[in-house]
Amino acid sequence: PAPAPAPAPAPEASPPAPAPPPWNDGIANLNLNMNDDDDDDDDVLGGTLVVRALYAEPGTTPEGKYFAFSTSRVERLVNACRGPDDACGWALSSRTTGDNDDDDATTAPATAPPLPWTVKDGRGAVARVRNERTRREDGALLLPSNRDGIGVGCWNPCEYAKPDDFRAGDVLVILDLTNPASFAPPALGRALRCAERTAITETGWNRPGSDVRFGRCGLVGAWWKALEIEFNVSLAPDAPDAPDAERPVPVVVTALRTDAPDDLPGRTVWIKDEDGVFVERAFETRDGLMTLREPAATTAARVRFEDTDLHKVGGLSTARGGGGLHVEVIGFAGGGSVGAVKKVGGVRMGKQDDGDGDDGREGDRGRLSTRKLGDGATTGRRGELPSV
């Protein structure tokens, strides 16, 4: 009989598929040290933030459109620039998240937002960022992730993100979290902590006045029209810097600072005087700093931008991603220096003072009306009056 055929050789085993990179399943599997232990000796006043990894949606390959970073690093930048009791409101901190306006909030986001990213709900921040590798300087979205201590980001809006926008190891500079002396000379003081920030005009996406803080999503006027914000800068009677008093104590205001471009037109600044009247003040604008011609002792200040067109705010706001500009009040907290400050001057009750009344912006003089506020104060206004 014919011999039985030899058995066919067993097929060779297929080589195992290569393991996906750790970020291929999103940031949930990132095995990176985000605790900044290796950055302890960094110059935090330089405002630098290192891209720790690239991010991509689960099941996709990272192309450099989105990046991951250490949120604790940015908190260190905030503390170094503004102090632990910062006037900022870092939105990725467990202290200030989402719609909660309480500085002492302890809630934190539990999940990462899905793409496309947006900060229209206040859950995240917008900041001016420069990538030192590409030298691009623009508005960027910074958002929380589903991993404690890890944030994600991209240029604003994320729908226009491109491959190689970012690479692991890129050094990013958050321009408004650099050495405060670089944007506000020490003689002007520092960013003041505000008891309250109130939006006088309607705002885009109905965001509250507290979002005008650096480290938050920022504000624009409704449909990118006029934006007006009031800052309550008075010291509470029990504040550490306040002298013994039965009512809020004035501080000294020297300037206001914004990340809006200097050529954004139509700015007006009012300072509340000792009679409760909001008085238009002359100022000079340079590199985002609106320096008052004369410092003022006050409990409140207002600033108005007649136009917050998304095409004029340097990438801070987009129709797809949201966001807006930021403003802070600069000065000195403490009653000791209040008596040395001259009484508020400028334009009051529709009349100009004995000076030239020029605030550095043509067309910003003499077109005022007045209106009684709920607390009995009177405010000088131009054009349409907001509801209060």
Image (cartoon, rainbow, N blue to C red):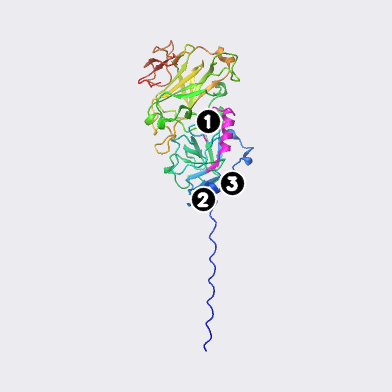
Q: How many marks?
A: 3
**SS class, disc 2:** loop
Label 1 sits on what residue type? Gly
- The answer to whether residue 205 of the structure is visible from this angle is yes
Rounded to the nearest angstrom, the CA distance separating label 2 from label 1 is 31 Å
Q: Image check: 361 left or right of 91? A: left
| Residue 77 on the magenta span | yes
Crowding near pointer 1: few (<14 within 10 Å), some, many (20+)? many
Circle 3 crowding by C-alpha within 10 Å: few under 14, some 14–19, many from 20: few
Q: Earlier in the sequence, mark 3 or mark 1?
A: 3
Q: What span is colored magenta in the figure?
A: 68-91
Return the residue found at the far top.
Answer: 354
On the image, numbered disc 1 is attached to which residue?
89
Image point 44% across, 46% down: which residue? 162
Disc 3 is placed on an element classified as loop
Write the residue at 54% across / 78% down.
Answer: 7
Identify the residue at horizontal 58%, vertical 27% (top origin). 85
Residue 287 visible somewhere in the drawing: no
Residues at marks 3 and 2, CA–CA distance in whole angstroms: 14 Å
Q: Secondary structure beneath disc 1?
A: loop
The residue that label 2 is drawn on is 25
Query: Is 214 one of the magenta-colored residues?
Result: no
Horizontal placement of 239 versus 165: left or right? right
Q: Of the numbered discs in the image, which one, if any, rests on residue 128?
A: none
